[in-house]
Image (cartoon, rainbow, N blue to C red):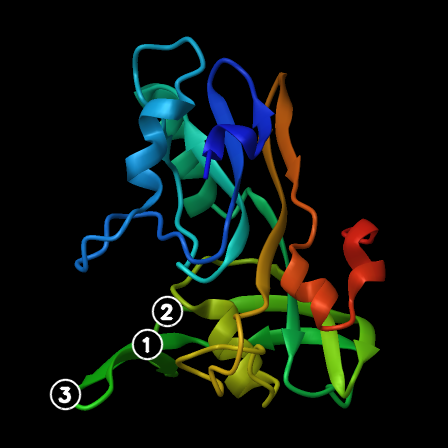
Amino acid sequence: MLLSDRVLFLDGEALVIDKPAGLPVDAPRDGTLSVENYLGSLTFGFQRWPLPVHRLDRDTSGCLLLARNPKAHKRFAAAFEAGEVEKTYLAVLEGIPAETSGTIDMALGKTSTAETGWRMVADPKGKPAVTHWEVLDTANGRALVRFRPKTGRTHQLRVHAATGLGLPIAGDPIYGTGNGPMLLHASALRLPRGAKPAIEAEALLPAPFEAAGFAAARADHG
């Protein structure tokens, strides 16, 4: 696999790749490959390796922003922290919501047990987490939903789907059944840069979404 063939955006300070599902951003404890192993192939003429600005879960595919120098990394990270980055995700839910759109405002906290390890849960005393959502299509008793998170908490969309909507993301191994691949995809990203053109990237839906009956939605990322 060549991540250099999966570039969605490239200029002097930013790089966006279409991260495949199954590839973690950071090096995992089990020693398997991660995005870190491919950074040397993403220099595109620069001596310095690019660095990821944010994280996507191992099983989440789609737009991943990397900075090509430390100053850019600091600015981009601050933009994420300030909620200035527009992020769009597409997900297939294990069912169809009663409503067609809405906003989930559910604070999240981390819990851990010896039996099941850690996970994120709804916690009024946790960190604020807000997600806008809307149903785009339905097929085979499932819904394709567009998520627009306003915050960037760990596992936010996965918990908001499973607990907030009562319908876990298809294939989610922690908050759902874990049957099949997890159908969560970072489909678009936009980061304003003042006088400079914004960083904008869009990643088409991967094959597992088409297999689930949502091939027509490939062009509808809005």
Q: Quadrant of residue 144?
A: bottom right
Q: Are marks 2 and 1 in contact (CB under 8 Å)?
A: yes
**Nearer to us in this view, 84 or 198:** 198
Q: Amino acid at mark 2?
A: Lys
Residue at the disc numbered 1: 109
Q: Residue at x 39, y 81 (%)?
A: 174
Measuring from the top left, give residue 134's x and y in whole percent: 75, 70
Residue at the disc numbered 3: 114
Where is 220 relative to 3, above or below? below
Measuring from the top left, give residue 126's x and y in whole percent: 34, 75
Mark 3 and mark 2: span between their CA atoms? 23 Å
Q: Quadrant of residue 132?
A: bottom right
Q: Which mark is residue 127?
A: 2
Q: Amino acid at mark 3?
A: Ala
User: Of the residues tagged 2 and 1, which is closer to the observer?
Assistant: 1
Element type at mark 3: loop
Residue 193 shows in this picture: no
Element type at mark 1: strand
**Nearer to us in this view, 212 or 65:** 212
